[in-house]
Amino acid sequence: MITEKKKMIAGEAYFANDKTLSEDRLLAQTLCFRFNQLEPRQVKAKKQVIKDLFGKTEKMFYIEPPFRCDYGYNTEIGENFYANYNLTVLDCAPVRIGDNVMIAPNVSLFTAGHPIHHELRNTGLEYAIPITIRDNVWIGGNTVINPGVTIGENTVIGSGSVVTKDVPANVIAAGNPCRVLRAITDEEKDYYYKQRKIK
């Protein structure tokens, strides 16, 4: 028998009010609540909650509370991951994040979707498509990443972007909808230092 959970993870239409999925979400909500209520100095305890929540973590990561997700077990983060305040991950499908990824405040990763036609939508059917964020990506504040998106390595997503399609590697992209503005070159290495000299 194919369960609603298996359908969800496989990208097929499923019913989210399924008992197992409801219990899974409640567990994730409980762990997120625990994480968000811990004292700022309780770094080890916060880290352990995330390890218990996520499907995969590496040794070095830090997430600023508050943080929220649907399931947790569908989220994987790489080494040296950092997320600022108010990261929301609707991880009904897998969310795979590479190494050295930085996420600014108020970013939302949405794998979840609903049928366009109201008759189907009103039945409670949902679907989910994975999100992949590759190594060395920096995502600006108030960005929304929609279902099915892959962001290539070394790319920067500008603040306030709504990412509806894949973004290639080694570019700066921004806007609503998000689009490539230009390539990132080796000249970027000197940019920060040039700015400091000007000041």
Image (spheres, rainbow, N blue to C red):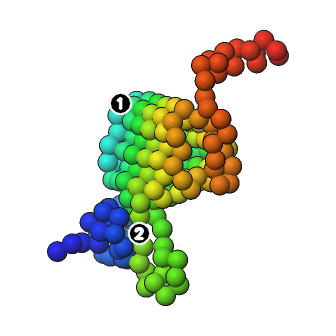
Residue 186 seen by the camera: yes
Q: Residue at x 45, y 84 (%)?
A: 120
Judge whether 142 appears above or below 82 on screen: below
Judge whether 149 appears above or below 194 on screen: below
Residue at the top extreme, as displayed: 197
Residue at the right extreme, as displayed: 199
| Disc 1 packing (10 Å; few <14; some 14–19; many ≥20) | few
Q: Are marks 1 and 2 in contact (CB under 8 Å)?
A: no
Q: Residue at x 64, y 47 (%)?
A: 179
Q: What is the x, y in percent for residue 81?
A: 46, 34
Amino acid type of disc 2? Tyr
Q: Residue at x 59, y 44 (%)?
A: 85
Between tags 1 and 2, which lies in front?
Answer: 2
Q: What is the x, y in percent for residue 186?
A: 59, 19
Residue at the bottom extreme, as displayed: 119
The part of the image, by quadrant, that contains residue 1 is bottom left
Q: Which SS class for mark 2?
A: strand
Q: Which residue is tagged 1?
A: 59
Q: Is residue 30 left or right of residue 88?
A: left
| Disc 2 packing (10 Å; few <14; some 14–19; many ≥20) | many
Q: Name the image quarter holding the C terminus.
A: top right
Q: What is the x, y in percent for residue 76?
A: 37, 45
Judge whether 196 appears above or below 75 on screen: above
For the residues labelled 1 and 2, the Cα–Cα distance comes to: 32 Å
Q: Residue at x 26, y 66 (%)?
A: 6
Q: Which residue is tagged 2?
A: 127
